[in-house]
Amino acid sequence: MIRLESVQLGYDGRLVLRDLNVEIVPREIFGLVGPNGSGKTTLLRAISGRLPPQQGAIYLDFRHLSDLSSQELARELAALEQEISCSFDFTVREVVELGRLPHRERWQRLSAQDREIVTRALARTHTLEFADRGIHSLSSGERQRVWLALALAQEPKVLLLDEPTAHLDLNYQIEIMELVRSLAKEQNLTVLVSLHDLNLALHYTDRVALLSEGRVVALGEPERVLTEELIEQVFRTRVRIVDGTGERYIVPLGSRQGVLS
Ligand code: ADP
């Protein structure tokens, strides 16, 4: 469904990622992990069509990304950036209604079907109960669910999430990831998600790409990619992978340079 062929990404001639050859299949949750600055956001930006590759090509359903209009792209793909801000205090429902924009002409009003889709997106993300409240009055965890509702109202096939759990308490991190996982299954969504928490990547992704020093250093099932050796090599931090209640967990032991040990 999404294919990257010999893609090179960067800014103003500065190279960030090279030799990207990745195929992301329908209905999978594909994780991006790697140290700060390794290019996770850059890669999501490129797949959302906002950063044209310096070299190579990105295909969405066999169509070259650059051949799609922004409206066509928005019907296929919804992207949640890391820092979303809303300067005006819209109500939650008004925010989610924006998700219907790609499906209608600018001058058209919301149809009954649009309203139903918006209500369904609110219900599915457990935000219906505060649909009439201002977006600024919500907690970070609640607001994150509203952005997800906005994305769902777009009825995309692909969901791009940039660190959706950043700044959230542990319980909200789990809640968001559980929600993403069930949405992917129910609505046949393909999800690309960048995560800095390796345990979330281990538990919630089907496959993961580990980015470091300008390239993908490993790609595959999270258990195969997130090994003690590779994590130490890439993050320069010693970890142990432990088994607890039938699940594996990555536990940091301290810095390789001995700063923490
Ligand atoms: P990550 O998401 O893994 O932290 P980013 O994709 O944000 O990494 O950044 C990768 C590299 O690209 C960094 O060196 C960063 O400074 C640079 N970069 C990111 N955004 C821009 C931009 N808009 N203009 C120039 N350089 C950028």
Image (spheres, rainbow, N blue to C red):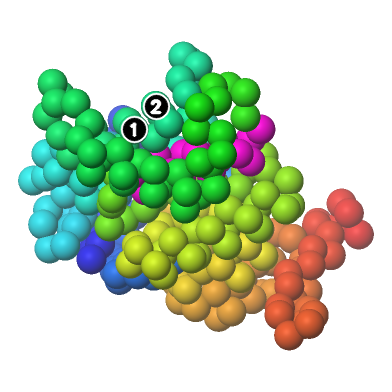
Query: Along the horizontal axis of the image, is 176 left or right of 75?
Result: right
Task: Please check the rendered image and state whether residue 141 is part of the magenta-colored stretch, yes or no.
Answer: yes
Q: Secondary structure at mark 2?
A: helix
Mark carried by residue 97: 1
Span colored in magenta: 139-153
Question: Residue at the spot x=65%, y=52% of the render?
Answer: 173
Q: Nearer the viewer, residue 159 or 100?
A: 100
Using the rendered image of the protein, determine whether residue 210 is visible from the camera's viewpoint: yes
- Residue 1: x %, y % from top left: 23, 66
Label 1 sits on a secondary structure element that is helix
Please rate how many residues cluster around mark 1, counting C-alpha atoms within 10 Å: few if below 14, some from 14 to 19, many from 20: many
- Residue at image x 37%, y 53%? 159
User: Any magenta on residue 88?
Assistant: no
Check disc 1 and give the amino acid type.
Glu
Which residue is most to the left? 67
Instruction: For ligand 1, tell me if the residue under mark 1 lies within 8 Å.
Output: no
Residue 37 seen by the camera: no
Please tell me which residue lies in front, 188 or 208. Answer: 188
Answer few, some or many: residues within 10 Å of disc 2's Cα (few below 14, many 20 plus, some between 14 and 19): some
Specify the label residue 94 is tagged with.
Answer: 2
